[in-house]
Image (cartoon, rainbow, N blue to C red):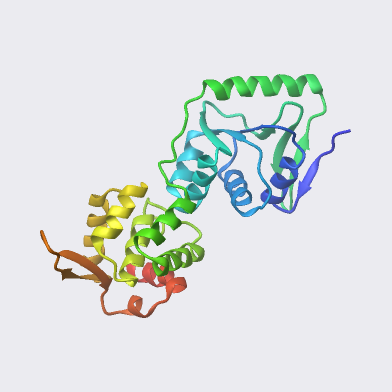
Amino acid sequence: MVSNLRGDDRRAAIEAILGTIHGDVLLVDPSIEAFRALVDYGVETDDELPAISVLAREDVLKDVRDDFLVASDAADLVESETLELRVLEGVVENTLFVGESDLYALVPASDSVAGLTADDEAFIADAYETFRDRFDAAEAFDLRTPGLTRVRRTMEDSIGPDARADFDAVLGSLEAARGNGDGLDEVTISLLVAAKNEALLYDISKWGEDIGIASKATFSRTKTELEDMGIIDTEKVPIDVGRPRLRLKFADGPLAEADGSELASVAQKVLN
């Protein structure tokens, strides 16, 4: 006999649900909170997730894309073929986990989250077929964000291990890295890390463009904005052929003394 499942929070409930469903899973109409909880569980657990076909509203997927921390972790799961993202037309009104023989609705309450199950086999089979058809017909969604594992590895290769350590420390101190003005975006974070390690603007912007974070023009424009605000400074470095390149460094001030874990909080105070 199937039973309802319960957890202290969304992540715990999702872990219980995914531990029960056999085979591939459809996740239908997740809230942004449920999607974040799924990604958090997926990247931090040692257990292998099943392949999950996510059918989500476009506004939810765009919110994910705007949050670099969530988007880059989700991109890791997409790149490993654990997640596949498509756009849900309309609203289902319940976050559903649907397998060929299992169906759970994720329902949050004040002090816990439940996975309420269905036990009608014909209904479950019909629901799976219905949402599988809707998923197959839906438009794919591109996060346009590189996976965090690849970001970290290539930053270490291109800029150095100290820069990667500072990058990890900054991300670890942030709840969101957004590109819409709400918090530090990924380009600003990368430039701050580069300045702390006195890397060349050419190297960090080429890395950022190659990995898919942003164009060289965006890096250059953001560098100019930070320079105009007195946050970073540059010095010219001669090269054998062509124009000198610019080395990034912090201008005199609190950021020059901050370690990686303090970088984000100090920068946000200066920027505000």
Q: Give the residue drawn at x 51%, y 31%.
A: 86
Q: Give the residue drawn at x 35%, y 75%.
A: 255
**Of 162 and 134, which appears nearest the observer?**
162
**Residue 181 percent across, percent down from the top left:** 36, 54
**Residue 17 percent across, percent down from the top left:** 73, 41
| Residue extending farthest right | 1
Which quarter of the picture shows residue 20?
top right
Q: How many marks?
A: 0
Q: Is residue 207 visible?
A: yes
Residue 191 vs 63, above or below: the answer is: below
Which quarter of the picture shows residue 77?
top right
Q: Give the residue drawn at x 44%, y 73%.
A: 262
**Residue 59 percent across, percent down from the top left:** 47, 37
Residue 230 horizontal side relative to residue 257, left or right: left
**Of 263 and 169, which appears nearest the observer?**
169
Which quarter of the picture shows residue 152?
bottom left
Residue 213 vs 224, above or below: the answer is: above
**Residue 9 percent across, percent down from the top left:** 70, 52
Q: Is residue 177 visible?
A: no
Residue 208 vs 117, above or below: the answer is: below
| Residue extending farthest left | 242
* Quadrant in the picture for the C terminus: bottom left
**Of 184 and 19, which appears nearest the observer?**
19
* Quadrant in the picture for the N terminus: top right
